Amino acid sequence: MKLKPPVKLAWVRFTSCSGCQLTLVNCESALASLAQVIELSSFPLVSSSVSGCEAIDVGLVEGSLTTPAEVKSLLAFRRKVHFLVAVGACALTGGINTVGKGERQRALESVYGSQCNDWDNFPPQPVQNFVKVDWQIPGCPPEQHELLQTLGAILHGGWPARQVMSVCMECRINESRCLLEADHAPCLGPITRAGCHAMCPGLGVPCEGCRGVVAEANRDEMYRLFYAAGLSEKEIRNRLERFGETFYDQVDC
């Protein structure tokens, strides 16, 4: 269904750093064109005020859910939104907020002491655990071109093409040096969804897996490669699950 301008768009933020909103703000050359077809009813990075409109054409959700109050707000938002888009790793998988999830209680006690149980909260959860999500834009932060492509496709009544390659393939296309082969670095490029132009490996930084798992990823082989490179079981688990994904079931090496 093609939406007629002005399209009512709202951005809501839960537990996150607001980096996903910055991605849109940094699309400077496209903002003037977007303003001609979009009516922005909420954008927390700019203003805490929210338009009172009942119906929203496109809703973008950033951040993971960590409290019952956030879940209540998300459910109310979903009821008003026609198309709901989860933006960024935190919204898709729980993201970097899930780091140390196995030691969460100890971390809370070390920071808050005897008051650690005074807050009504739970481990970070992705948006899709609570409501229907129509589209996802991965990354930490997401890529500008993917955000703009998604908005453009929705405005014209469709969805952008899904990414089926891995970051490893983008490295090959860019003719970048393979960090996994050359340095035995713990790079997650072979099992991570492409779309970032392999920016991190291209700069000599091993892929962290922030874009989530590519379809048909060989998780077991990734585990074996890391094990052969000398990483411990704990180091491998931390690496593979850093952004909230359950990348693997333990395999025999």
Image (spheres, grey):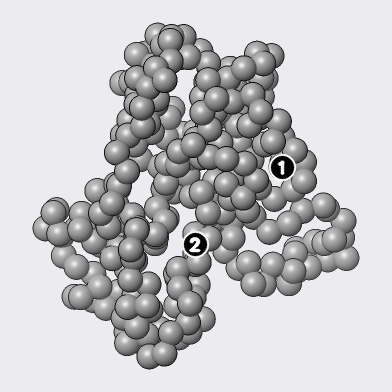
Quadrant of image for the C terminus: bottom left
Q: Is residue 165 left or right of residue 22?
A: left
From this viewpoint, is residue 42 visible? yes
Specify the farthest residue to the front: 1
Is disc 1 placed on a helix, strand or loop?
Answer: helix
Q: Is residue 104 above or below residue 87?
A: below
Q: Is residue 165 above or below residue 23?
A: below
Q: How many labels does the image show?
A: 2
Q: Dot 2, how many residues are within 10 Å of its Cα: few (below 14), some (14-19), or many (20+)?
A: some
Residue at 49% over, 62% down: 245
Q: In this view, does 133 lie to the left or right of 190?
A: right
| Residue kind at label 2, given as amino acid type | Glu
Image location (x, y in percent) of residue 234: 51, 81
Image location (x, y in percent) of residue 101: 63, 67
- Name the residue carrying label 1: 71
From this viewpoint, is residue 46 visible? no
| Residue kind at label 1, given as amino acid type | Val
Query: Which numbered disc covers residue 245?
Result: 2
Quadrant of image for the N terminus: top left
Q: Which of 201 and 87 is in front in this view?
A: 87
Q: In this view, does 161 lie to the left or right of 123?
A: left
Image location (x, y in percent) of residue 18: 54, 38
Is disc 2 placed on a helix, strand or loop?
Answer: loop
Q: Is residue 212 above or below residue 237?
A: above
Residue at 53% over, 54% down: 93
